[in-house]
Amino acid sequence: MNLDDTLRAWAAHEVALPETAAEEVFQQIVETPWAVSPTRLSAAQVSQQIVGTPWAGSPGRPAADPVPPQVVGMPWSVSPRRHTTGLNTRWWTRFSGQLAATVVASTRPPMSGLRRTAVAGQPS
Amino acid sequence: MDRAAEFRRLYDTHRTAVHAYFTARTGDRWLAADLMQETFLRAWRRFPELAGRPDDARRAWLFTVARNLSIDEHRQARTRVATDAALRAETADVAAPASTSVIAAERVAVVSETIKRLPEQQRITLTLAAAGGLTSAEIATALGVPAGTVRYRLSLARRTLAEALSTYDDVEQ
């Protein structure tokens, strides 16, 4: 077995992606709408997820969504390791960032009120 | 030809090389599959623009996206230590092929370990040639380096592998 044969065997065993996985990737791509980002959530979707998250429950809000929030973005991962861990870390990073931004934005006082206060405080 | 069929041709032509590139960069073939998916997803969205280009230009476009994605991936707290850990973890996952002899399997293991220790540029170049099925000229287009540089890197990498195999053979005899 010379070097080229050994390299071929190495490529087959350690690098090559199984055909089924490659086909799955292809199908997921072509099912994607052209202009809509599959991984980026809209503000409405983020709000919906916050409402549906068990720890975000408050009076007047709907009951917690029985589906864990991390399932929403999962179809974009083909990694079996990620499926086994149950959490796509790439998706989670993006989601938690958006979640934090939404929470921060929702706790800010309205801009118009601030402006009114500032204007009222100025000497006339 | 409809859009999906034409995209299929692009995907089938370049997916092995793009995946090999990401595997060489990350040391994890499943992470590489995710990054490959992201690369082709961008190609799918920009396909009307890509469709009219020649194969070399498409390859260059795909590898530009791939380079940017792997840089982003690296920035996202994937340190060299983590990559090395993934490389080591992959070793444990790889079972000896049933159809080859023990010695052949051991030689593959020697090559595998040696490739992991190669400088990154040599590892990427060698992986694109051996697993991606690209010629030196195609690798040059993909990586945006002169073909002479590709040949030099390949020659260094192959020499290192040959030395490692020779050492293994000496020990075995």
Image (cartoon, grey):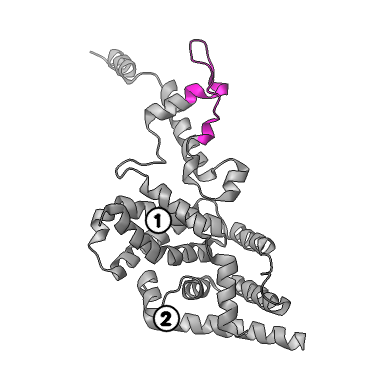
Vertical arrangement, residue B100 with respect to residue B1, above or below: below
The answer to which quarter of the image holds residue A7 is bottom right
How far from the left and from the top, in percent, is residue B59? 34, 66
Left or right of residue B91, residue A22 in this image: left
How far from the left and from the top, in percent, is residue A75? 48, 42
The answer to which quarter of the image holds residue B72 is bottom left
- Circle 1: is it few (<14), some (14-19), or many (20+) Cα within 10 Å? many
Disc 1 marks which amino acid?
Answer: Thr
Tell me the chain of label 1: B
Quarter of the image with the C terminus of chain A is top left
Report helix, strand or loop for mark 2: helix
> Any magenta on residue B165?
no
The label shown at residue A90 is: none
How far from the left and from the top, in percent, is residue B172? 76, 85
Vertical arrangement, residue B72 with respect to residue A119, above or below: below
How far from the left and from the top, in percent, is residue B41? 38, 51
Which of B71 and A71 lies nearest the eye of the viewer? A71
User: Mark 1 or 2 closer to N-term?
Assistant: 1
Disc 2 marks which amino acid?
Answer: Thr
> Any magenta on residue A61?
yes
Residue extending furthest toward the top = A60
Residue under label 1: B39
Residue span colored magenta = A50-71
Separation of disc 1 and disc 2 at Cα?
A: 25 Å
Left or right of residue A32, residue A64 in this image: right
Which of B57 and B117 lies nearest the eye of the viewer? B57
Residue at 34% across, 62% down: B9
Vertical arrangement, residue B80 with respect to residue B129, above or below: above
Of labels 1 and 2, the one closer to you: 1
Residue under label 2: B149
Q: Is residue B74 visible?
A: no
Q: Is residue B130 visible?
A: yes
